[in-house]
Image: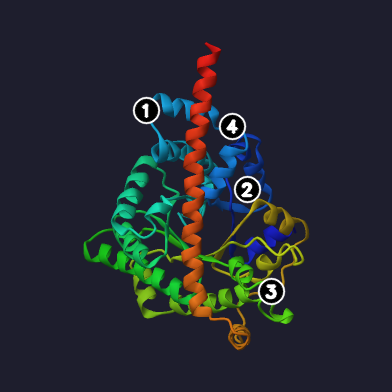
């Protein structure tokens, strides 16, 4: 049995953290679904920026959308949904077989709205209606203002992937926003069947303290904070609040591991995948990490033991001078800023490419 199948069998779903038109056209995504147990997919502005910038696969779509008068964000969302609609169709059998528990794709709302709840809500609802896909998550950052957007979007019936979570506290705040949205739906006589996932970012923790802590602590912070968050997640699932909502038909908001590619070239390339193998979770992997784990991944102890190492490890980081709570806030802010930078680069790329294609088209005439 290949490692990806073994991980799937213990109850952790594997989603691919990338999308390109080439991935769809050359059959790789189908291969990953059929042979590597991939059951979902996530995207972000950086992924689309790289995909559009590095080739010509999107040229025809950009020209077609420009001919309809579309520019900027409107143009981007149209071509992004072309890809995500194709991917969603590939995952549709999984989505149907699991009754909506799996088989999802994700599209991020504009990162420019990360600190503006009302425009975020409006855009999430609009994109949900525009896409018309039963297995599309809209990604909303779990920033403090984003929490209101998450609650209101869930109340409006929009499936949400809460992104940019870096700590147990940020996860709990996002989970509370989701549960409030579901509770309000029940009070209003609406169906509670609005799915959500909560995306916890792992590797950026270790990148942030690289070279600042003793060697024995190297590449251990992300795993420790992740383990503490998973323990809290399991406790929340057993709470009376969640049990009551589940009994009413609400889905469980699954914990998703994001940023699981290893950034330290001296570390094992499957480090975070192996360390965070846990039932009832999702791991969204970069393509390289997926292939590495399928090739030589090892499935060791799962995060189900009664004794947790995270408290002791996190105490060692505090002794080493790491302000974990402060760093979590910093990482979320930097993550949102990074997405804005990628978004601006993406918008510039689409504009430049559109103008260049228009000129080429004019010259050909």
Is the residue 279 above or below the residue 306 in the image? above
Q: CA distance from mark 3 to mark 2?
A: 38 Å
- For numbered disc 1, what is the local secondary structure? loop
Observer-side mark, 3 or 4, equals: 3
Residue, disc 4: 57
N-terminal of the pair, mark 1 or mark 3, is 1
N-terminal of the pair, mark 3 or mark 2, is 2
Q: Residues within 10 Å of mark 4 (few under 14, many from 20)?
A: some
Out of 55 and 125, give the one closest to the viewer: 55
- For numbered disc 2, what is the local secondary structure? helix
N-terminal of the pair, mark 3 or mark 4, is 4
Residue, disc 3: 211
Residue, disc 2: 33
Please state the horizontal and vertical placement of residue 170, each as a whole percent of the image: 44, 72
- For numbered disc 4, what is the local secondary structure? loop
Observer-side mark, 4 or 2, equals: 4
Q: Residues within 10 Å of mark 3 (few under 14, many from 20)?
A: few
Out of 205 and 237, give the one closest to the viewer: 205
- For numbered disc 3, what is the local secondary structure? loop
Please state the horizontal and vertical placement of residue 191, each as a whole percent of the image: 30, 58
Q: CA distance from mark 1 to mark 4?
A: 20 Å
Residue, disc 1: 69
Residue at 42% over, 27% down: 66
């Amino acid at each position: 049995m290949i490692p990806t199948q073994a991980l799937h069998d213990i109850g952790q779903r594997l989603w691919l953290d990338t999308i390109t038109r080439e991935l769809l056209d050359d059959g790789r995504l189908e291969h990953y679904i059929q042979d590597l147990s991939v059951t979902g997919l996530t995207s972000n502005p950086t992924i689309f920026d790289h995909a559009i910038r590095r080739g010509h696969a999107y040229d025809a779509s950009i020209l077609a959308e420009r001919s309809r008068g579309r520019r900027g964000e409107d143009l981007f969302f149209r071509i992004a949904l072309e890809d995500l609609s194709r991917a969603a169709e590939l995952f549709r059998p999984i989505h149907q077989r699991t009754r909506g528990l799996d088989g999802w794709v994700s599209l991020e709302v504009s990162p420019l709205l990360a600190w503006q709840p009302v425009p975020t809500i409006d855009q999430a609802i609009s994109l949900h209606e525009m896409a018309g896909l039963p297995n599309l998550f809209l990604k909303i950052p779990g920033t403090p203002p984003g929490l209101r957007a998450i609650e209101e979007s869930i109340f409006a019936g929009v499936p949400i992937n809460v992104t940019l979570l870096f700590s147990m506290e940020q996860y709990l705040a996002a989970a509370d926003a989701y549960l409030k949205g579901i509770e309000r739906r029940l009070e209003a006589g609406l169906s509670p069947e609005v799915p959500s996932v909560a995306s916890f970012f792992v590797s950026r923790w270790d990148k942030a303290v690289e070279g600042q802590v003793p060697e024995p602590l190297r590449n251990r912070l992300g795993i420790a904070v992740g383990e503490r968050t998973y323990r809290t997640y399991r406790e929340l699932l057993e709470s009376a609040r969640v049990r009551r909502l589940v009994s009413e038909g609400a889905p469980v908001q699954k914990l998703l591991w994001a940023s699981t590619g290893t950034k330290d070239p001296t570390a094992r390339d499957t480090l975070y995948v192996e360390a965070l193998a846990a039932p009832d979770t999702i791991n969204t992997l970069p393509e390289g990490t997926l292939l590495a784990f399928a090739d030589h991944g090892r499935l060791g102890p799962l995060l189900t033991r009664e004794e947790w190492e995270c408290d002791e490890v996190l105490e060692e980081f505090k002794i080493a001078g790491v302000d974990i709570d402060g760093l979590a806030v910093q990482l979320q802010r930097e993550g949102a800023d990074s997405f804005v930078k990628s978004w601006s680069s993406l918008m510039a790329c689409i504009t430049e490419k559109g103008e260049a294609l228009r000129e080429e088209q004019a010259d050909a005439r």
